[in-house]
Image (cartoon, rainbow, N blue to C red):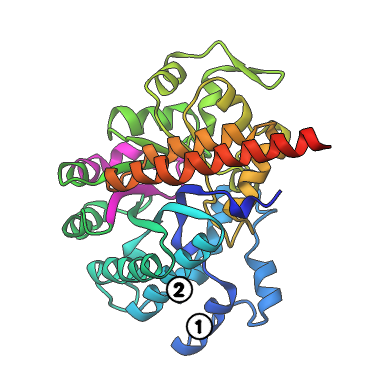
Amino acid sequence: MDYTSLPKAILHDHLDGGVRVATVIELADGAGYTQLPTTDAAELAKWFHQGRSGSLELYLEAFEHTYGVMQNQDAIRRVAYEAGVDLAADGVVYAEVRFGPSLHTLDGLKREDAIEAVLDGFDSASRETGIVVYGIATALRQETDSEEVANAAIPFAGQGLVGFDLAGPEAGNPADDHEPACRLASEHGLGLTIHAGEADGPNSMWRALAHCKAQRIGHGTRIVDDATLLDGELTNLGSLARRVRDHRVPLEVSITSNLHSGSFAPQIEHPFGALYRAGFNVSINTDNRLMSATTASSEYELAIEGYGLTLTDLGSITANAIEAGFGDWPTRRRLIDEVVLPAYTSAVSNQSATSEST
């Protein structure tokens, strides 16, 4: 089946985790950046692939070279534009792409200038392809400038920037260290999505929800540690797991990335299917298209081939993801009603007709 033709929604995709390899090389050459491990495109693509990193900390090391070449507005604008174009070509109709404004200030660029460049690039991609793509400003847990990031983001709320995020290593860097920044962003109209429950346990998610008032959780798969996972099914949910399920807290799941970063070992251990069947509000995401050598289409295919989901399931997950988005609601409702649901209804019908004819 051609999964590219299916409309998809992505809530968790990192801008500096999805740069085209050729663009990295060209930007490095133009900026005099000499720290790339190689300038051979095939070798560099292989180097960036973090399929065997085995830990979140090692997985994150590869980003040094992507944001390293994104230190001026032209470079940032180009990467953002290409991200929108690439996602659209992969059948993504709605995307929220996150980026760390502070990572683009190494050569003196202001955070606000970085945000402006990202949104300019997204706008160009949207006008060219029709994709609806918004930005999420990310602060890093291990740094101390989260309030500065929030303050830089606030003027762009409602102008293409829709959310605030905390990322980076969870262990030893609790979300509530950044509670003032989260409160500031929320008070000024930005949605809150926080990385939690990726490499650390349910307590990390509880802190994000209870202290920082997160509306969505980035990854969140370790919520299974507050339940019993037996024979591929979740039972005996603890109080936090019940809250996450019953309150419909969106979990931005990225299957391939989780496997690469060591959150789960073999694919059969990843609880995506179990979470979905147990009623959790899961979405399907790419996280880092470059580092995990993945696409939205391949993640959707993995959901069907690896976890027994159906096209009807994918349609529901996609609609739910768009509903959980932070972007303009009339636009999201239109995508759900006029694009996503009709497309999946047609795909299911065609699949049934094909099965009957054979």
Which residue is nearer to you in this view: 182 or 249? 249
Q: Is residue 180 magenta?
A: yes
Residue 163: x and y, percent? 30, 49
Q: Residue at left 59%, top 48%? A: 257
Check the picture and name the quadrant holding the C terminus.
Answer: top right
Which residue is nearer to you in this view: 97 or 50? 97
Determine the secondary structure under disc 1: helix
Q: Which mark is residue 147?
A: none
Residue type, numbered disc 2: Gly
Q: Which mark is residue 28?
A: 1
Q: Is residue 126 magenta?
A: no
- Residue lying farthest top? 236
Q: Which mark is residue 68?
A: 2
Q: Residue at left 21%, top 52%? A: 147
Residue 103: x and y, percent? 37, 66
Q: Residue at left 40%, top 25%? A: 248
- Residue lying farthest right? 358
Which circle's residue, 2 or 1, is located before the other in the chain? 1
Q: Residue at left 58%, top 32%? A: 313
Q: Is residue 283 above or below residue 16?
A: above
Determine the secondary structure under disc 2: helix
Which residues make up the magenta segment? 161-183
Dot 1 crowding, Cα within 10 Å, few <14, some 14–19, many 20+? many
In the image, taking residue 278 as reference, residue 38 lies left or right, namely right
